[in-house]
Image: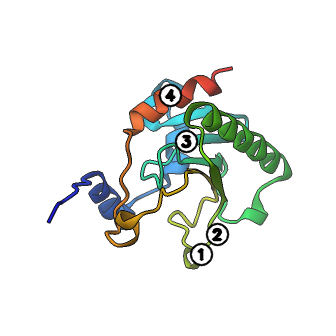
Amino acid sequence: MERLWTPWRMAYIKDNHRQKGCFLCDLPALDPSNDLESLILVRGELSFVILNKFPYNSGHLLVAPYRHVPNYEDIAVEEHAEMAILTGRCIQALNAEYVPQGYNIGLNQGTAAGAGIPDHVHSHVVPRWGGDTNYMTTVGETKVLPEALEETYKKLRPYFSA
């Protein structure tokens, strides 16, 4: 039997149940000079884009308001507008760098809907390719990602610098 080691998953398993605070509040509060370490690609006035530390696919991005609000309907109109603009920029950057064949774009509101961070609303931008869900994901419950987060950050960051 072959084994595929995914040691990064253990951090998710452990942190998922013990996480204190809100990383969607804590990381943007750090100095912008820490953005590479925080995986923040771009900061808007009301919202920001961050790489998902535990991605479904390479290039999996999160778009979130700075304001700590749990529900989609609680987001201010201005926050909605900026999040929509940033989502479009995410798609443009991912199209240019990774050429995905499609996207999953959306959010999970509430734990019953699968929200891992139910207290801070955020949307997911997940690039997709034909066949990116295969026996490893379906049977092995393991996702094989071909690229480290730091490499993804370095590839996508230039698209948000302008």
**Disc 2 to disc 4: CB gap under 8 Å:** no
Q: Residue furthest left?
A: 1
Whole-number angstrom distance, CA of label 4 to CA of label 3: 13 Å
Q: Could you tell me which quadrant the C terminus lies in?
A: top right
Mark 3, residues whose alpha carbon is within 10 Å: few (<14), some, or many (≥20)? many
Q: Is residue 129 left or right of residue 137?
A: right
The amino acid at mark 2 is Gln
Describe the element under mark 1 as helix, strand or loop.
helix
- Between 12 and 69, the one lying in front of the other is 12
The amino acid at mark 3 is Ile
Tell me which residue sits at (78%, 65%) in the image. Answer: 73
Q: Residue furthest front?
A: 130
Q: Name the front one of labels 1 and 4.
A: 4
Task: Indicate which disc residue 109 carries.
Answer: 2
- Between 156 and 51, the one lying in front of the other is 156
**Disc 2 to disc 1: CB gap under 8 Å:** yes
Task: Indicate which disc residue 155 carries.
Answer: 4
Q: Is residue 16 left or right of residue 22?
A: left
- Between 127 and 119, the one lying in front of the other is 127
| Image position, residue 142 (x, y; %) | 34, 62
Q: Which residue is mark 3?
A: 50
Q: Name the front one of labels 4 and 3.
A: 4
